[in-house]
Amino acid sequence: MDKKADFLKNHADPVTCFDQLREQPCPVQVNNQHWPLMRHQDVVTALLDPDTFSNQVSSHLHIPNGMDPPKHGPYRATLDPFFTAERMAEFQPIATAIARNVLSTLPRASNVDVMKCWATPYAVQILAAFMGWPRRYQRPLVDWIKAQQRATHDQDRRALQRLANTFDSTIREIIGLRKNSGHYQDVTAELCQLKVNGRPLDDEEIISIIRNWTVGELGTIAAAMGSLVVFLAKHPNLQTMLRSRTDLIDYSVDEILRIDAPLLSQRRRTTCPVHIGGDDLDQDTEVTILWSAANRDPRVFQQPTQFRFDREPELSLLYGKGIHRCPGEPFARLVMNTFVQEMLSMYPAIDLAVTKPLRAKFPSGGYEKAYIHNPSLKKRRR
């Protein structure tokens, strides 16, 4: 059934669209070389079999998520120490300060756009702080991301290539400063000194890692923040509970983002003929893992669109599974949980405005616009 592309193009909500496609009796495909995996069992099968479902799907260098074993292992082992519990504890006060600053910076308007005022500024500032970049890079990064999203939605390959060249030039400037001076002591400077298999990383490898950690995460973090705020605004009783039970915030963030995935899809490539989900796929079939569909599969999650406190956390695929499970999971948890805790502590109520939230277009997750009543016009808790 070659109708997925048209269905998505004309559907206002890709998340519910995938739910409908997942339950169709006939398989849905874009063409003979592109096959979506939507059911939880099929996605887990692919994630746990990297030999059959390769992560190397692009001609461009993607470290480490675009690599297969055995090449993947040494890079992953080199990068994992950046996200240890000790390093996250050191970054916690910085994240808290950024969250408080962003949350308190609101216009005087009665309604505010969560994505514009909170989600995107927080994502940009938190990533810049983690990487050690000065403020002058933040505004250009936001503009660059917006332009990339437009080009991606429009499938404008020339614009995407032009934007990639612009980004690479900026990153070369940043790493050049750190390679030529011992003054810098930040994560980016550390990346410039890394070795893999006994040799220093070259510039292309460093750029790939930085692209993955910034471009790859900025949109996802912003989408996650928007979805979290909208969901909590729709569920005031959950807000009230979490203000007194902050120990439940971590679980609640995971459950909300299981329901409303900030990252909708990722690609894999079959290395041999394979039978999965009742279908036979040829070698070199491009497979799209649809996280939102798998995490809302009723075969695994009863009442999948409902928030429940009795889920088994290990069943959620929010951070993936297997050898490619998201290495930045500790960082993502820290920044999201910190924001939610500070928001609920700072404001006594978060309420949606009358204007209906506008979903982001596939392949982006979350919302393009989402308005809430300006909470700064109400009495704050601190």
Image (cartoon, grey):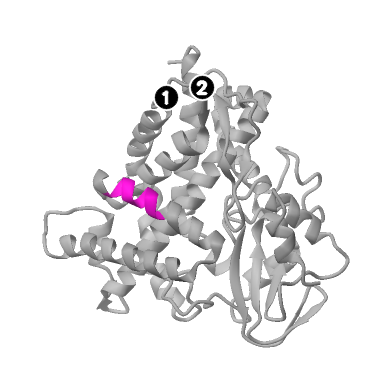
Asked if residue 251 lies left or right of residue 184, the reply is right
Marks 1/2: CA distance? 8 Å
Residue 343 to residue 348: above or below: below
User: Can residue 212 be seen here?
Assistant: yes
Binning the other alpha carbons within 10 Å of mark 1 as few (below 14), some (14 to 19) or many (20 upward) gives: few
Asked if residue 292 lies left or right of residue 331, the reply is right
User: Can residue 338 be seen here?
Assistant: no
Query: Which of the two residues, 238 or 221, is positioned nearer the viewer here?
Result: 221
Residue at x-position 45% and y-position 58%? 148
- In the picture, residue 315 is in which quadrant? bottom right
- Residue 373 - label: none
Residue 304: percent from left, percent from top: 77, 46
Residue 337: percent from left, percent from top: 50, 38
Q: Mark 1 touching mark 2, by CB under 8 A?
A: yes
Instruction: Give the quarter of the figure containing the N terminus.
Output: bottom right
Amino acid marked by disc 1: Pro
Residue 176 to residue 184: above or below: below
Which residue in the protein does label 2 denote? 374
- In the picture, residue 92 is in which quadrant? top left
- In the picture, residue 264 is in which quadrant? bottom right
Question: Residue extending furthest top?
Answer: 379
* Span colored in magenta: 137-144
Residue 234: percent from left, percent from top: 67, 29
Residue 285: percent from left, percent from top: 66, 81
Binning the other alpha carbons within 10 Å of mark 2 as few (below 14), some (14 to 19) or many (20 upward) gives: many
Instruction: Give the quarter of the figure containing the C terminus.
Output: top left
Which residue in the protein does label 1 denote? 107
* Secondary structure mostly taken by the magenta-highlighted segment of the chain: helix
Query: Which of the two residues, 263 or 114, is positioned nearer the viewer here?
Result: 114
Question: Would you say residue 155 sits in the magenta stretch?
Answer: no
Residue at x-position 63% and y-position 37%? 357
Amino acid marked by disc 2: Asn
